Image (cartoon, grey):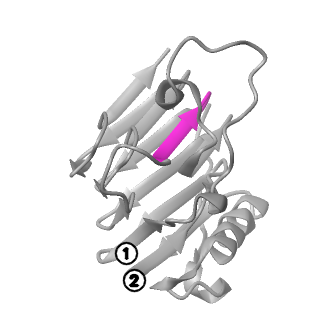
Amino acid sequence: MKARPMSWHTNVRDLGATGDGVAKDTVPVQAAIDAAEKQGGGTVTFPAGSYLCGTIHLKSNVTIHLSAGAIMLASKDEKDFDPYETLPFTPVNDRETTYFHYALLAGEDVHNASVIGEGGIDGNRSKREGPKPIALKRCQHITIRGITITNAPNYSISLLGCDHVEIDGVQVLNAYSDGIDPDS
């Protein structure tokens, strides 16, 4: 699958994100990603700041650019995250391995998407219990480059059934589980 050119750009603050680490920015951040998808793809930029969010859904042909000093900060409120998905079988593995919806940045059946930059993702936890910072299921042509993931309470980057994934220059610090966990 050939990547589309991504010329459309938006800044999450243009859609109402505050980046103050206190106000929940989930709605404006998701609106920026959805707008990029509707344009056929593009780049969603996070300028320096701390963006408190629950589950954000990555979309096809969208690049998330975390600028230097920009942090996607996981909410401490469990109600801000998608619940574990219902599966058509009884899983034999633990929750960390089996489920992908309970995440800060989730993507399912997404293609040609990226999470890049000099900023990072903060799982905002101090023990091994909470949402995955990045969880991707059945995705193709994914790039994760340059970011730093801290305080991850679950697999920092979890991949299930994904093809053509490039992870480069990513730092995982103070994690309470696997850094990069590819399955299938």
Magenta-drawn stretch contains 134:
yes
Number of marks in the image? 2
Secondary structure state at the residue bearing disc 2 = strand
The answer to whether residue 125 shows anywhere in this view is: yes
Magenta-drawn stretch contains 138:
yes
In the picture, measured across the screen, residue 107 lies left or right of residue 124, that is right
| Residue 2 x, y percent position in the rendering | 60, 36
| Residue at (78, 17) in percent of width and height | 88
Kind of residue at badge 1: Ala
Q: N-terminal of the two: label 1 or label 2? A: 2
Magenta span: predominant SS is strand
| Residue at (74, 68) in percent of width and height | 35
In the picture, measured across the screen, residue 181 lies left or right of residue 170, that is right
Q: Is residue 14 above or below residue 120?
A: below
The answer to whether residue 46 shows anywhere in this view is: no
Residue interval drawn in magenta: 132-139
Question: Which quadrant of the view contains residue 24?
Answer: bottom right
| Residue 107 x, y percent position in the rendering | 62, 43
Q: Is residue 79 above or below residue 136?
A: below
Nearest to the observer: residue 138 or residue 155: 155
Kind of residue at badge 2: Gly
Q: Are marks 1 and 2 in contact (CB under 8 Å)?
A: yes
Q: Is residue 101 above or below residue 178?
A: below
- Residue bearing the label numbered 2: 49
What's the distance in space between the residues labelled 1 and 2, CA to CA?
5 Å
Secondary structure state at the residue bearing disc 1 = strand
- Residue bearing the label numbered 1: 70
| Residue 29 x, y percent position in the rendering | 62, 72
Question: Which quadrant of the view contains residue 41?
Answer: bottom right
| Residue at (44, 67) in percent of width and height | 72
Q: Residues within 10 Å of mark 1 (few under 14, many from 20)?
A: many
